[in-house]
Amino acid sequence: MAMKDEHDALIENKTWELVPRSSNANVIRSLWIFRHKKKSDGSFERYKARFIGNGANQQSGIDYGETFSPVVKPATIHMILSIALSKSWCLHQLDVKNTFLHGNLDETVYMHQPPGFRH
């Protein structure tokens, strides 16, 4: 069920387009990563699955130009919390089931379909 939820979210967000394999393309291996989602008291809540591409055999300059992963720095979180405290703002925790970073790729990326969900 966790894999189906992830797959449905990928389809709904139009994450990829299914195309015939190009004979000269480097096709990235795909795999599932699993983990347990826990409640705030540490007890089990549900299973989570993430579909990822393993780019370990890609070559810089051939398969990609640069890599970038946006990350929130602890100093930024500290600053936001400090402002919220000084302004007496209410803070709420949010658990996001699926997140997608939208960006434009300059390269065409070929990746195997998710194991268990091949057309």
Image: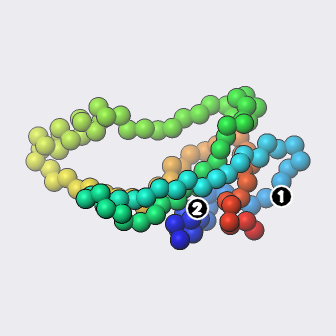
Q: Do the residues labelled 1 and 2 touch (CB within 8 Å)?
A: no
> Residue 115 placed where, x, y %?
68, 61
Query: Is residue 114 rendered to the left or right of residue 80?
Result: right
**Is residue 106 at all visible to an observer of this figure?**
no
Q: In which quarter of the image is residue 18?
A: bottom right
Question: Residue 77, position in %: x, y?
Answer: 28, 39
- Colour mode of the rendering: rainbow
Q: In which quarter of the image is residue 17?
A: bottom right
Report whether residue 99 is seen.
yes
Report whether 20 appears left or right of 45: right
Dot 1 or dot 2, earlier in sequence: 2
User: How many other residues sit within 10 Å of disc 1, few (<14), some (14-19) or many (≥20)?
Assistant: few
Q: Position of residue 48 (x, y in %)?
A: 48, 60
Question: Between 116 and 14, which is closer to the camera in this rendering?
Answer: 116
Q: Residue 10 carries which label?
A: 2
User: Seen in the image, is 14 located left or right of residue 89?
Assistant: right
Q: Disc 2 residue type?
A: Leu
**Residue type, mark 1 in image:** Pro
Residue closest to the eye, 116 or 9 = 116
Give me the residue at 16% from left, 54% from top.
Answer: 90
Q: Which residue corresponds to the image point at 71% horizontal and 40% vertical from the top-left?
A: 107
Residue under circle 1? 20
**Element carrying mark 1:** loop
**C-alpha distance separating marks 1 and 2:** 19 Å
Q: Residue 39 carries which label?
A: none
Question: Which quadrant: the C terminus?
Answer: bottom right
Residue in view at x 18 percent, y 39 percent: 83
Mark 2: secondary structure:
helix
Left or right of 65 in this view: 8: left
Vertical order, 20 against 66 (above or below): below
Residue at figure coordinates x 79%, y 58% from the top left: 19
